Image: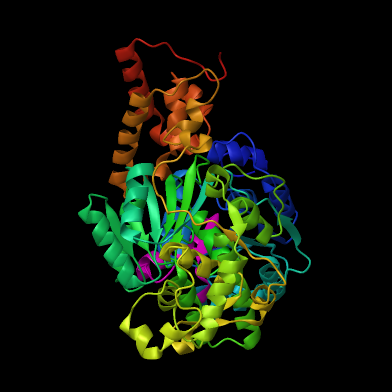
Amino acid sequence: MDKTGARTPHDVLKGYFGYDSFRPYQEEIINDLLDGNDVFTVMHTGSGKSLCYQVPAVLLPGTCVVVSPLIALMQDQVESMRQVGIQAGFLNSMLLPQDAFEIEQAARNGGLDLLYVAPERLMTEGFLAFLKTIKICLFAIDEAHCVSQWGHDFRPEYLQLGVLSGMFPDVPRIALTATADEFTRKDIIEKLNLEKARHFLSGLDRPNISYTVDVKNNEKKQLLNFIRDRHPGESGIVYCTTRNKTEEIAGFLRENDVPAYVYHAGLDRDTRLRHQNIFLQNDGAVMVATIAFGMGINKPDIRYIAHLNLPKTLENYYQETGRAGRDGEPAEAWMIYGLQDVAVLQQMIDASRGEEEFKRIQYRKMDAMLGYCESGHCRRQVLLAYFGERLDGPCGNCDICIKGIETVDGTLAAQKALSCSFRTGQRFGVNYLIDVLLGKPAERIRNFGHDRLSVYGIGKELSAAEWRSVFRQLVAARFLKVDMENKGGLRLTSKCRPVLTGKEKFLLRKYRVADARPRESGKRAASGPGAAARSSGPHVCHEELFERLKTARYELARKQSLPAYVIFHNSTLAGFATFLPDSLAGMRSITGVGETKLEKYGEVFLEIIREYKREKDLAVLQRGED
């Protein structure tokens, strides 16, 4: 029993976090850990992975040591725990020596439920010696995919964490990740010595996220239209490949009155932290970032993730898009890409120092990413199938399902494109090949003598944009490969032979002009703050009150330098604005209200509700009352 009287996982869940019931697998995982067993779990972002070790940390005597890969996020995680009444601390290079000493003393004296630490610090000789001086009840290895070179975000420091099983044989361990294909899962289990652990693989589907992929033609205009038309005033993340591009895109958005901030590894630490805090603490802020930003971000109301370049792998893509809609309300994953993105990824793989097997697997992952973009099937079905899951029917919440896709027999177009590449020497890029197919009277074509080839001018039935679509799909099908040693020229692969010789047909997605304008989608229509509460039966969310509560929350968070959602999530405020509780006991019935937060903030929000009811002459509506 802890100091608050909690005796069971359900007591902790309700008393600290304000939830009435566990999500799938949480309770089973928690009970396994309480029984002293090791656990390995893959649970999608927003499914409540952290609760799986936070609840045992409260109930078990001693300290749970949490391995977290990003120092910048530890403070946010610790503050979130302290807000619900759980004793937590972190040790990293950001702390002053005196502060670090006090955290260490608290751990030695049994005053910490959770201690967050980076893997680089954990595995030092001095820190391992320190761990021997405290009572450890559990090791939680977060973002466990970092241990595997087959996954994404590989961190060499994670490879050393396997020694914990030998050094602390009686301490249970849990390894957690949101994304891991079969290769990565096997690697995690082997590297962390979790062969005897019980495995939990929850469904990875995020039905509240809508997926869209479009062709890149004017990325700045496309992005601005997307934000203005579909997500005005909402928080989002825009991912770019390079640091320079993040600066360029953020500047463009600010010029167009979108509050955008930059995050990449080239910024000094203070700037990164300042931009991160602005993003976390404000509604409507947009972060333009490289993949250096996002891991562990717990902001629940990110409404969209935009990719302006092709992600390296579907693991990366799933992990990054999963940062949207953690509150369960509708969100969107939007991406635009072009063939140049494929060339850049190929160059990165070829230039890497990995073994040939590593490069082969990375090419396989790139093919899967490109195949996802060019597929004519439901995006969600393709994405989940990659991770070994089956979705029985189309999702109805992606661009393919909503807009539909038309395929045609593209065998002749494919043969023309392949022949053009072959007859021009397999050393020219897509723009040049299109000019040849269209019979453009360009001096460069005449100088090479390609205006005398049989393929010159044979493709006038298609536009340049349509030919680009043909070439993208041929690259996606691995019939063509971008040759980076030859300045991005397109080379034929052996796989194209059956189509080139007419033995096989090639189905072509009919070209559709990219469009970032609003679309009809039943799931998207329910979006916006408080949407979940607004749809709860006959009860109605009072939007004016909801906005007043948000303003009060913002001021409370600002005074404490906290993200607003650490005080209460939007869904909790929407519950207040829907059921209009008239007492602290009534507030306790709203999801997300634990005892510590009720004590800290209950009266503040209760007074706002009472004032609103007096103004509107409203009676209290008890939760569950029709």
The N terminus - image quarter: top right
Q: Which residues are magenta?
A: 91-120
Which residue occupies the extreme left position in the image? 255
- Residue 69 seen: yes
Residue shown at 24% from the left, 61% from the top = 251
Q: Is residue 201 left or right of residue 312?
A: right
Q: Assess whether residue 107 is covered by the magenta stretch.
A: yes
Q: Where is residue 38 shown, x and y percent of the image? A: 72, 62
In front of the other: 354 or 561: 354
- Residue 123 seen: no
The C terminus - image quarter: top right
In front of the other: 567 or 343: 343
Q: Where is residue 454 shown, x and y percent of the image? A: 51, 81
In front of the other: 106 or 432: 432
Q: Is residue 291 left or right of residue 201?
A: left
Residue shown at 33% from the left, 80% from the top = 442
- Answer above or below: position of 570 versus 89: above
Count of marks placed on residues: 0
- Answer above or below: position of 502 versus 562: below
In front of the other: 91 or 389: 389
Q: Assess whether residue 52 is covered by the magenta stretch.
A: no
Q: Is residue 23 left or right of residue 80?
A: right
Q: Where is residue 371 shown, x and y percent of the image? A: 59, 64
- Answer above or below: position of 262 versus 148: above
